[in-house]
Structures are given as structure tokens and as C-alpha cells.
Image (cartoon, rainbow, N blue to C red):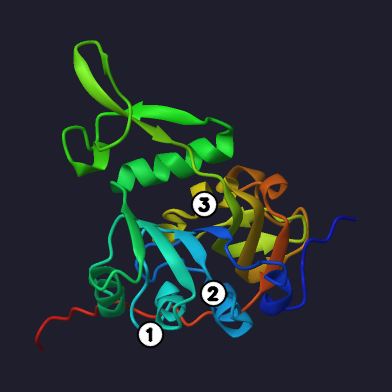
Amino acid sequence: MINKVVASADDAVHDIRDGALLVVGGFGLCGIPENLINSLVRRGVRDLTCVSNNAGVDDWGLGLLLKTKQIRKMVSSYVGENAEFERQFLAGELEVEFVPQGTLAERMRAGGAGIPAFFTPAGYGTVVAEGKETREFDGKPFVMERGIVGDFSLVAAWRGDRLGNLIYRKTARNFNPMAATAGKICIAEVEELVEPGQLDPDCIHTPGIFVHRLVVAPRQKRIEQRTVRKG
């Protein structure tokens, strides 16, 4: 029987080399592949290009790779919670490509679906459209955006089986399904591993055909910002 489970996060990312293009799931600190990211920090790979909604925070998520200056370029939508990101960007130490959030999700999805490019109205007339082809459809202007295909995609799921089928939990789904399909090699970390047949087929978010490696790893699930009412 097919078994895509590997022994550790370190084993899962063993062949990610310097200069790789990584598509990383998550939103803020929700649904990020924290164990896989930590393994990349330990491996010391450099000059990475990371496509992700955000860059984590200073001491967690992709922020750890920024701290060690292992990331050369970020393709992101939101970076407001990371002071080191801001410092590197303003100092010219980090290349940044800002992408509207919906456009970023669609660029991942398009890459995974084999669609090289698409047109969207988002960003027309702004710096987002600079240097890109524009076209008019039905009297409205659109910007052409390229699909994204990474060397690897790193995602985090709630449950998975040995065939690589994945289920994400609630808002932790976010960018993960699109990111999973956008990498030539998809590596997933899961909280719970079950046997084939135990996942309801109607509930599977990422079919195993897209997933190449799976690691079972505990996750901290840190909260980016905690807001509470006064007692």
C-alpha cells in the first residue's frame, strides 16, 4: 500500500536546496506548517523565495527564516506584524512583491490547475499593475497575473491518511488547499494520522494525489494577537 508518511519534519524537507521557491500555507499564525519551517531553519538553506500570505511574526513561522536571513524574496499580501520584515525591506536587504490577497490565492490555484495566467480587475491603475499586461473586457480594465508554481509547497492540516489525503480544520484551511496544489512537491504536516478509508471522502479538502510527503508533528498553535474583554 502507498505510504507517504516520513519519520520527521527534518526528513520531509531534506531535499529543499538553496534558492528554492516555496509556496507556504497559513494566514497569520493560523494553519502554518511550523514544524517544517523550523526544520528549514535548522538546515540553514538560503536564498529562498517564499510565497505566503504573510511572513509570520518576529519569533515564529516564516519570521524565523527572516531572522536568520534565509529568505531572499517574499511574495505576500500582508506583513504588518513583523518588525524584522519591515527593517529588512526598508534597508534593501529583502526583495518584496506585494500581491492583493485574492489575487495571491488565485495565482496559487491557477498554478496548481495548470493555468499559466489570468486577468483580474484587482490592482488596475496602481503599482500592482506596473509592468504587467492590461486588457479590457466588456468595457472594464483588467490586469494579467501569472499562476505560481513552486519547487515545493509546505502546508499544515488537521487530519491526514497514509495516502496523503488531507482535511483542514475551520479557518486553518485558509491558503493551504491552494498552496498544496501549487508546488511540484507538496509536503504536509498533520496533527492526526488515520488509516486509509477512515476519512469521509466528501470531507477531504486536498486529495492525496497532490501530496508527496506527510509528517505527523505536534503544533503549538500560537495566537498572533489576543484580544479580551475587561472582567
Q: In which quarter of the image is the N terminus?
A: bottom right
What is the secondary structure assignment of the residue under circle 1? loop
Q: Do the residues labelled 2 and 3 touch (CB within 8 Å)?
A: no
Write down the residue under mark 2.
Answer: 37
Spatial separation of the CA atoms under disc 1 and disc 3: 23 Å
| Identity of the residue drawn at 54% across and 59% down | 22
Q: Is residue 54 visible?
A: no
The circle on residue 179 is 3
Residue 27, by quadrant, is bottom left
What is the secondary structure assignment of the residue under circle 3? helix
Residue 174 rendering spot, x and y as whole percentages: 41, 55
Spatial separation of the CA atoms under disc 2 and disc 1: 12 Å
Identify which amino acid the numbered label 3 is placed on.
Answer: Ala
Taking 138 as reference, is 92 above or below it? below
Say which label, 1 or 3, has the lower sequence index: 1
The circle on residue 59 is 1
Identify the residue at the far left of this view.
230
**Neighbours of disc 2 within 10 Å: few (<14), some (14-19), many (20+):** many
